[in-house]
Image (cartoon, rainbow, N blue to C red):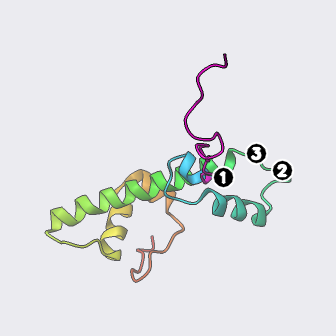
Amino acid sequence: MPGPRSQGGSSSRRRRSRTRSRSARAELSFSVSHMERLLLEGRYAQRLNWSAPVYLAAIIQYMTAKVLELAGDEAKKKGRRFITPKLLDMTVHNNSLLCDFFRSTIISQVAPPWE
C-alpha cells in the first residue's frame, strides 16, 4: 500500500525565490550597483572586489546620516523646522572631523569662509 499523498501538486506549491538587490541584502538605502558603476568608470583599480561597492555605499550612507543628524540638532537649537544649506555648512564647519573631511567641498548656496 502506498504512503499518504501530499495534498496539491508539487508544482502548484513551489516557492519562488525572489532575487533581492545587493542593496536590499546589505540593508542599505544607497545603491550598491551605482557605487560599483562609479568605481568601474573611475578606473581606480584594475580589478574590483565584490565587497568594495557594498562597503563604499555603507560608508556614504553613514556619513550622510551623521551630517543630517547633526544638522537637525543645529536646526533645533536655532528654532528652525527645516535643514537649510546654511545649517549644513555651519554643521560641517563646527565639527572638527567633518571640517577636515569636507575641506575642499562647497555646499551649494553658501560661500565657504576662505582662510
Q: Residue furthest right?
A: 46
* Residue type, label 2: Arg
Which residue is more in the foreground, 99 or 9? 9
Place of residue 27 in the rendered image (x, y in percent of width and height, measured from the top left): 50, 48
Binning the other alpha carbons within 10 Å of mark 1 as few (below 14), some (14 to 19) or many (20 upward) gives many
Circle 3/circle 2 CB separation < 8 Å: yes
Is residue 72 rendered to the left or right of residue 27?
A: left
Residue 19 lies in the magenta-colored region: yes
Binning the other alpha carbons within 10 Å of mark 2 as few (below 14), some (14 to 19) or many (20 upward) gives few
Q: Relative to 38, say whether 11 is above or below.
A: above
Q: Relative to 30, say whether 81 is above or below.
A: below
Q: Quadrant of residue 86?
A: bottom left
Q: CA distance from mark 3 to mark 2?
A: 7 Å
Q: Residue furthest front?
A: 1
Residue at disc 1, secondary structure:
helix
**Circle number at residue 53:** 1
* Residue type, label 1: Pro
Circle 1/circle 2 CB separation < 8 Å: no
**Circle number at residue 49:** 3
**Circle number at residue 47:** 2
Region of the chain picked out in magenta, as a range = 1-21
